[in-house]
Amino acid sequence: MSQVAKEPFVFAACVELRQALDQHAHDVRELVERLEAASDDSVFFHVHGYFLRHRPVTTAYGNDFARWIAVELADLALAERLAVVDPFKFESLAELREELVTIIRGQLRDAGPGRRVEFAHAFHFQQSRIVPVPLGPRATTLAEFRQGLAVADVSAIHHHMVEARARFGRRGGDFATWLRGALGLSALAEEIEHIDLYLTTPERVRGRLLGLVDHALETEEGGGSAGR
Amino acid sequence: MSAIDLYRAVAPPNAVDIILKLAERVQRRRFLHLTGGRLGGGPAEILRAAVPLLNELGVETNWEVTGGDGVYFAAVQALQAALQGAERVLTEERLEHYLALNQVTAKKLRLEADVVLAHDVQPASLVANRSDGRWVWRCHFDCSHPQHHAWSFFRRIGEQFDAAIFSLPAFAGRLAVPRYVIPPSIDALSEKNRDLGTHEVAAALQELRIERDKPLLVQVGPLTRDHDPLGAINVYRLVKRHHAVRLVLAGIGQDDHDGQEVLADVREAAQHDPDIVVLELPPEAQRQINALQRAATIVLQMSVREDFGLGAAEAMWKGKPVIGGASGGLSQLIIRDVTGYIVHSVEGAAFRARHLLNNPELIPRMGAAGREHVRRGFLLTRHLIDYLALMVHLGDEGSGAPVPVSAPRA
C-alpha cells in the first residue's frame, strides 16, 4: 500500500523578476573585477539562471559569462574553460565565484584583456528576485507526485531543483527532501539528488525525474524498497 | 469564457494559470497607469489590451493621461530626446512649465493606488504628488547615455520613485532605486497579430495592390532615418541582382524636415522601380500590416536606432525570419542563425537574404523558431505575469513609501 504523506507537496512555479545592476564589463579585465565584487544573487542569476533561460535551440555555453565571452569577445578558449565549470559541484556561490575568477585571472595573466566591445555589446550584470507561484497540484502519495510532476510548470523544476539547492541552501532539493522525509523513499530521493542538472534543460530534467518515479512506482507501487 | 482564457490558445502552457494565481494575491489592489496619451503604439498599445484584462482578473486598474499646451509638449519631447542622448536645448523656463502643468494635472487626477506606473517622461513628475502606494517609473526607451544636463534634471524626479523598470539592462539609467528589467510585448490576439486566413491575407494585399508573383521582402516601421528605409532599398537592390524579389516598405512618414527628406528619397527610388512598393499607412491599418507581415518571405528591420524593435517580434510571431540591424532590443529578439540574423551593413543584410532565398528550407524552420521564441518571451501574457509578480513583490516588501519630496527644480 502506498505511503501517504502528512504534509503534502505543493508544486510551485516561479517568476524571475530581473534587476539591472550598475556594473558593466567591456572586456575580460572589467568582467573579472566586477565578478569579484558581484553579489551571490548576481552570480546565481548568471550561472544557475542560465538553466532556466536557456533553450536547446541555441548553443549551450553553460552560463552567461561563457556565452558573452564566446559571442561578443570571440575568445572561444576562455569561453570553453568557463563553460565546463559545473555550478552544482560547489558548496556555495562564493566558492563558485572564486573558481570563475581564478579561470579568468589565469587567462588575463597569459593572454591579456583581449578584445574590448562598446556598451551595447557589454556584459551587463543583473540579479533577480524570485516570486514563487504555488500553482499546485498538491501531492500526498508518490502516484500523485508523479501526476503533479508531469503537469507542473517548467519553472517549478527550476524552483524545486535549482533554486532550492543553490540559492536557499536546501542541499538535496525540494523533491528529494520531501520524498525522503514525507514518504520515506530514501533510495529514490538519493537517485534524484544525483541527477545531473548541468548543461541540460528543465524539460529534460523533468523527463529524468519521471523516469525515476515511474521506476519506483513499478517496482514497489510507490512504497516499497525504494523507501528502505 | 473569460477574456484571459482566450490567451490559452497562444500562450505557453501554464502561463494563464500563473496569471490567475498571481492575480488572486493582488485582488482588489489598485493599479494605476499614467501615460502621455491613449493613442498610438508602444506603451499605449499594450495598455489598451492589458488594462481590461487586469480589471477582469480583479485588479482594480485605472489609466490616466496627462496633457498640456504646445510649450509643454515641446518640453516633454526635448527632454525625452535628450534623455535618449540627442542634443537638445532645454531651457529652464520650459522645464519649469512642464513641472507646473503636471502640478495642475495632479490636482485633477486620482493618484491614489497601491502601485502606480508612470510611463516615460510626460507623467513622471506627478510623483512629486504621491501620497500612498508604491510608485514605479516605467521607461520604454534607452536612457543609458543621456545628455548630462537632462539627466541631472530628471534624476531628481526619478529618485522619488520606489523603483524603475527598463526594457533591457543596457537601457537602464543610473538611478539609486531598484531597477527592474521587463521587456515589452505584443498582443497575439490584437488585430495586428491575430491569425489571418489565407483569403484575408490575399484580400488585404489586393486592397494594397501588391502582387504576390515574387518573394516579398517587407519592412514595416516609420519612414525615418532611424529605421533606415533607404538601407532596405539598397539591400533589395543587391538581392535583386540574383533573385526576382519585391520590396514593400510600409509605415508612417514624419512631418519634420528630416522625415520629409527621407520620404522624398524613398519615393524617388520607388518611382524608377515598380518592384519597390511604398505604403504610407494610417495608424489604424492594423489588419493590413498583419497581412503584409504574413505575406512576407523575409522581414527586414534595418533600424540603426530602435527603442526595442517590437516590429521584429510581430513578424517572428507570424513565422517569418527577420534580418535586423544591431540596435535596441533586436539583439534580444533575434537569435542569430536560429530565428534570423543580426547584421551590421547593407551588404550583410543582402548576403543573409540571398542565403535564405537560396536555401528556402531554412525560411519556415527559422520562422517556427521565431514564433516559439516570441511565445515564450514577448507576448502580453508574459508582460502580465511580470507586472503582477512585481505587484506581489512590492507588496511583500511593505508599503512604507519614502517621504515625498518637493518637485525638482531645473
Image: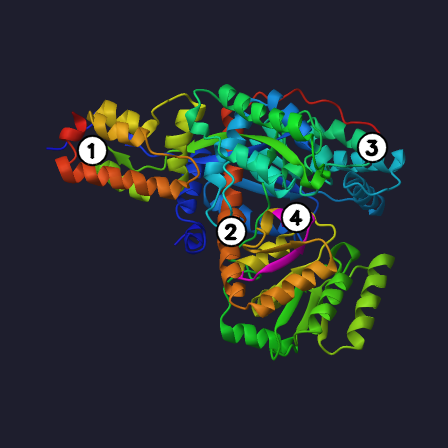
Task: Name the residue that disc number 4 marks.
Answer: B308
Labelled disc at residue B148: 3
The x and y percentages for residue B21 are 40, 38
Q: Secondary structure at mark 3?
A: helix
Q: Relative to A220, is B327 above or below?
A: below
The chain identifier of the residue carrying mark 2 reads: B
Alpha carbons under labels 3 and 2: distance apart: 37 Å
| Side of A92 relative to A118 (left or right) | left
| Residue A8 appears in the rendering | no
Q: Position of residue B147 (x, y in %)?
A: 82, 36
Camera-side residue: B95 or B171? B171
Q: Are marks 3 and 2 in contact (CB under 8 Å)?
A: no
Which kind of residue does numbered mark 4 sit on?
A: Phe
Callout 3 and callout 1 share a chain: no
* Residue stretch in magenta: B318-331
Q: Position of residue A200 (x, y in %)?
A: 42, 40
Secondary element at image label 2: helix
Circle 1/circle 2 CB separation < 8 Å:
no
Decide: few, some or many residues near mark 2? Use Cα within 10 Å; few <14, some 14-19, many ≥20.
Answer: many
Q: Which mark is residue B373?
A: 2
Whether pointer 4 and pointer 3 mark residues with C-beta atoms closer than 8 Å, the reply is no
